[in-house]
Amino acid sequence: MLISPPLSPLVDTKESPQLGATKLKTMEPFSQREAIALQPRFAQIKKCLVSGHASVITSSWRRLLWELKEEIDLISSRGSAVIPTIDFADIDKPACTEAFSHRLRKRGVAIIRNVVPRDTALAWKQDTLRYISKNPHTKAPPSTMPQLVELYWSPAQVKARVHPNLFAAQRFAMRHWTSSDPSVGLATSFPVAYADRIQIRKSGSPRLPTCPQVGGGSVERWEQDGYGRANTYEKVFSGKWEDYDPWDGATRVGVTSDLYNGEGSCSVFRMFQGWLALSSIAPREGGLLVCPMLRAATAYFLLRPFFSPTRSREKAGDSFLDAANWTLDTPQNSILHGALPSYAQELNGLLHPHLQLGRSLVRVPALRPGDYLIWHPDLIFAVDGAHEGPLDSAAMYVPACPLTQTNALYLCRQRKAFLLGRPGPDFGAGSGESNHAGRPGVQDVSEAGGEDGLRAMGLLPWDEEDADSDAERRVLAVANAILFPDRYDMI
């Protein structure tokens, strides 16, 4: 069945008359069964990106298709084994981290096991269920994503976000990022808490559609006012995708990933999206699928809108995916395959055939209570449609966010939401948990996470003497000025 979502006025309804022009604030994925034309200005954006180097872009595209074929053959043969794992007890041991780090940078996804003790994680799940039971007026989950529980400030969530082991795991993970410009304001040693939701999949629940997607915006990746502000993908668009470094933090700090204020979109810089398992989650028990070829897959979904097949799949047959069958569009159209303003970036086999998602998407290995699954913000992922396990599965969304000026500005707004019990700023308005019994406060944060926990929640200034460099010290000073203007002068 073709699902035509309500679209913003940024969709060209003259070219797509069957689609409405009603604005819907959402970042939920949908099944885009055909390429959808956007406003004509997107054609101009595409033209500007490739203007003057059509030949090198075409050559780059051909090299990319070859790389994808090789990588997909490898991934499909190894399956979940390509995803690296490390035990939390080993993250400070160079002998254990060297090989892990190499694989993480290549694959863009990893598991840090035993970050939180098993009994603690299981207790947090039970605490969450009791919190919901005490507060039956908790907002119901969206019908399109019934596994998501609309809670942001439950006792378990607050305790998890400020747990010392989570901070240690996040610092370790964020050390895999580098910076091509040391002067850029970025501090990975000072994680910032980001309030997201909880996923609880009921045993025996109906199968959900599997919708591969990428977080961090959609059309913003091609727009000058989005990722273009930091030249994040300049190497890809200039025909040198092999030189693109997905781990360069300097090309992310200036990004605006939410130009269209989509509810549920993420407006902060997440170095990693993350799941903290609160139960056992085996493959086919409501876990995640990922496409673990970070650089090549990112380059592909960025370049795909510039190319079209000369012969359809029906006419080309087995040669449909061959590089010789694909040419750079002249002139460029306004289509950004799978991307629409205010929606999550969607990937599927019809719009992105070379990804062969049936082969390149692999299920994450079994998670145990207390394991921490992390993945790069550009990684293609999907929630498994199947839950065939005997027990409910549960995980918290706990991303790893560095301290930056943008993240400090968000934290200032999120702090107010926490104190009032309202949803995080990225998740819309409403009363949220303001009237929930048992909602934690500042003292609970202090007891669970100490000073580091209070700072991560924006409740205590950072000690600027803890900085390891002048650039990091400036970040702390700016963040303190934003969050505590009465005590600090803006730098």
Image (cartoon, grey):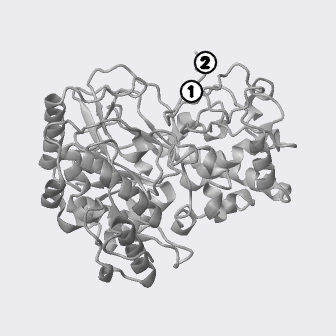
Q: Residues within 10 Å of mark 1 (few under 14, many from 20)?
A: some
| 18 lies left or right of 210 | right
Quarter of the image where one finds residue 152? top left
67 up-or-down from 43: above or below: below
- 31 sits left or right of 57 in the view: left
Where is residue 277? Give x, y as percent.
Answer: 26, 44
Q: How many neighbours does mark 2 have within 10 angstroms: few (below 14), some (14-19), or many (20 or more)?
A: few
Where in the figure is residue 171, as x and y percent of width and height? 34, 66
Give 286 or 265, whichever is nearer the viewer: 265
Quadrant (top left, top right, bottom left, bottom right) of the C terminus: bottom left
The residue wearing badge 1 is 31
> How far apart in space, not on screen, are marks 1 and 2 (Cα)?
7 Å
Looking at the rendered structure, the kind of residue marked 1 is Ser
Query: Number of labelled discs?
Result: 2
Is 43 located above or below residue 145 in the figure?
below
The tag earlier along the polypeptide, 1 or 2, is 2
The residue that disc 2 covers is 2
Residue found at the very far front of the displayed protein: 486
Q: Amino acid at mark 2?
A: Leu
Q: Which quadrant of the view contains residue 51?
A: bottom right
| Image quadrant where one finds the N terminus | top right
Q: Is residue 405 visible?
A: yes
